[in-house]
Image: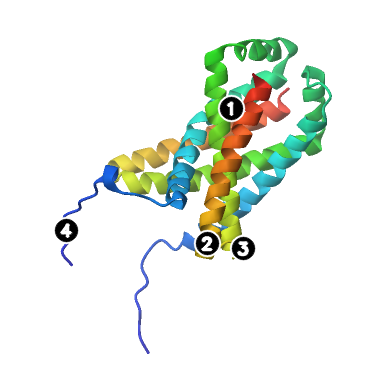
Amino acid sequence: MNRKRPKHLALHQIRLPLAGYVSILHRISGALLFLALPLLLWMLYASLRSIETYTALTTIFLHPLAKLGMLLVLWAFLHHFCAGIRYLAIDLRLASSLARARASSVWVMIVSLALTLLIGVKLW
Amino acid sequence: MVNRVVTGAHYGLRDWLVQRVTAAVMAVYVLSLAGWLLVQPQLDYDAWTGLFASNIMRSFTMLFLLSLFYHAWIGVRDIVMDYVHPAGLRLLAHVLVILALVMYVIWAVQILWGL
């Protein structure tokens, strides 16, 4: 086998189906959640430690930038959650036909974005 | 009779299964917590710490976090294997991720039981 086959991946020219975007966003959101782990653990710590740290935490979240950052993490979680449920459904052969796979990828985008918006509005 | 040489590290099927089992555990935990949050008339410090007062909730949370860390290890390892090709750099990335996750386990125990 020729190990030095040339690759021509013009990423900007590749047109993915929606399920392809759901898939790469599953990876990106997962990486984002991993990077956010120390922050999230610190938030759990501060929220439980004492009434002072709890109050300090709620004060931090009055800042618009903190809210925006949290909204991003919230979206990452909701997308990862919904896309993950979709993969479980595909494994159980509940959505393995092409038509159902396409429809479920649309639902993942709609539900995760709608829930992010809904919870975001409620938290704001 | 064909003597087929099977190569690889043989953790594929196990990790595939672990990724799904840990996902199911996390989904149950998150949906339970979301349900609890929805029925709270007003969320304050007392209600929040009250939830984590029992050993059952602390254990359930620890189970969730252990599932999360194992799930994160498989996911991040696969990402590193896809994009980081030099062996030394890949090893370094893997070691750093493992160390971080083990630290998180220790930290999680301290948060949940060290109050």
Residue B46 at x, y = what percent?
82, 19
Residue designated by label 2? A99
The three-letter amino acid code for the residue at tag 3 is Leu
Q: Earlier in the sequence, mark 4 or mark 2?
A: 4
Marks 2 and 1 belong to one chain = yes
The three-letter amino acid code for the residue at tag 4 is Arg
For the point 60% across and 32% down, which residue is it? A116
Between the C-alphas of marks 1 and 3, the distance is 33 Å
Q: Secondary structure at mark 2?
A: helix
Q: Mark 3 — on which chain does it sit?
A: A
Quarter residue A94 falls in: bottom right
Between the C-alphas of marks 4 and 3, the distance is 38 Å
Between the C-alphas of marks 4 and 2, the distance is 35 Å
Q: Secondary structure at mark 1?
A: helix
Marks 1 and 3 belong to one chain = yes
B54 on left or right of A19: right
Q: Residue B10 — which label?
A: none
Q: Nearer the viewer, mark 1 or mark 3?
A: 3
Marks 4 and 3 belong to one chain = yes
Residue designated by label 4? A5
Q: Earlier in the sequence, mark 4 or mark 1?
A: 4
Residue designated by label 3? A94
Residue designated by label 1? A40
**Quarter of the image with the N terminus of chain B in it:** bottom left
The correct choice, above or below, for B10 with respect to B62 in the image is below
Between the C-alphas of marks 2 and 1, the distance is 38 Å
The answer to whether marks 2 and 3 mark residues whose Cβ atoms lie closer than 8 Å is: no
Disc 4 packing (10 Å; few <14; some 14–19; many ≥20): few
Q: Secondary structure at mark 4?
A: loop
The answer to whether marks 2 and 1 mark residues whose Cβ atoms lie closer than 8 Å is: no
Quarter residue A6 falls in: bottom left
B48 on left or right of A106: right
